Amino acid sequence: PILEQNAAVRARNRSHLYLAIAVLAIAASVAWTFVGPDLMASTDGSGETAVQPVEALEEPRLLVVSEPPGATIFVDGVLRAEQTPAEIPLDNEVTSRVRLEAAGFAPQVLTVSPSQSRVRYVSAALAPLARESRGAGTIRVLAEPDDALVFVDDILRGSASPLTVGELTIGSPHELRVQREGYDIRRYQFTLNSTSPEVFDIQLPEAMASGTLSVVTEPAGAEVTINGQSVGITPLEEMPVSSNVDLDVSLTLAGYQVYHTTMRLEEGGRESLTQQLERRVRASSNSASSGTTDDGQEAAQESTYELLP
């Protein structure tokens, strides 16, 4: 009986040992799954084993949400995302200023303080601009040369300087374009945030390079417009124009269809444009049918064309 009791004790001890080994094996497997890839050992060829360091934690990030969504995100004055919601990298050791802008809404600035959190979250409800102020924005343009053409949102607003342009929607993006033949074009993107006039003082630089363009039409006498500015009546011989820029050329003559084309001259280039203008016509048709043909088919209606003056 004593021998049988000792054998039973040894069997229980072996069972406990096997269980402990199994637990340790499982724990080691789990640990290797999560940590092993970052602690893999490598041999550099000298026989010594080098342990690769664990990769740095993911950089801090900020999740930005707005109501309504679609706001543009600026951080410390730098554009970081085109529209909310968005997740952007952010240094969590310094204070940052997050600015949200959306058309038709007042901009909002949020201050994000330093934090130990790797991922942070901010949200903002944007306040709509007052309806009565949305169409009251104004800009004042001072241009040199003073006969430069002024376009706002691709609409010609005038050529006298100074020029005041009103009825611009506050909170919406706009584009100002100032141009004159022989000078470089200037474009500006802007958004009005108040009813106070915004002043643009613009001096156009002379085009660095130029070429010549000759224009001949049949019949002659057509008005030539380049980039929205009238430059003369055909025929025009070797007229100085800017090179390395797109030239939008229009030919207009009463009673004829307007002709449009786009040209680009190389530096010092000489180009000619010869164009046969087409008469404007108005088509009309007889209301009554001309009868039927011998095979029973209805004859086509007669059409006439009238030349317009």
Image (cartoon, helix red, strand yellow):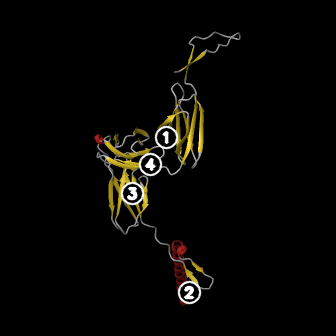
Disc 1 is placed on an element classified as loop
Earlier along the polypeptide chain: callout 1 or callout 3? 3
Disc 4 is placed on an element classified as strand
Q: Which residue is mark 2?
A: 7
> Residue 304's mark?
none
Depicted 209 relative to depicted 234: above or below: below
Q: CA distance from mark 2 to mark 1?
A: 106 Å
Q: Which residue is mark 4?
A: 186
Q: Which residue is mark 3?
A: 74
Q: Which residue is mark 1?
A: 227
Depicted 298 relative to depicted 182: above or below: above
Crowd around label 4: few <14 · some 14–19 · many ≥20 (10 Å): some
Rendered location of residue 35, percent (x, y) = 51, 74
Rendered location of residue 125, percent (x, y) = 33, 51
Q: Nearer the viewer, residue 27 or 218?
A: 218
Crowd around label 1: few <14 · some 14–19 · many ≥20 (10 Å): some
Q: Are marks 2 and 1 in contact (CB under 8 Å)?
A: no
Depicted 113 relative to depicted 277: above or below: below
Q: CA distance from mark 2 to mark 3?
A: 78 Å
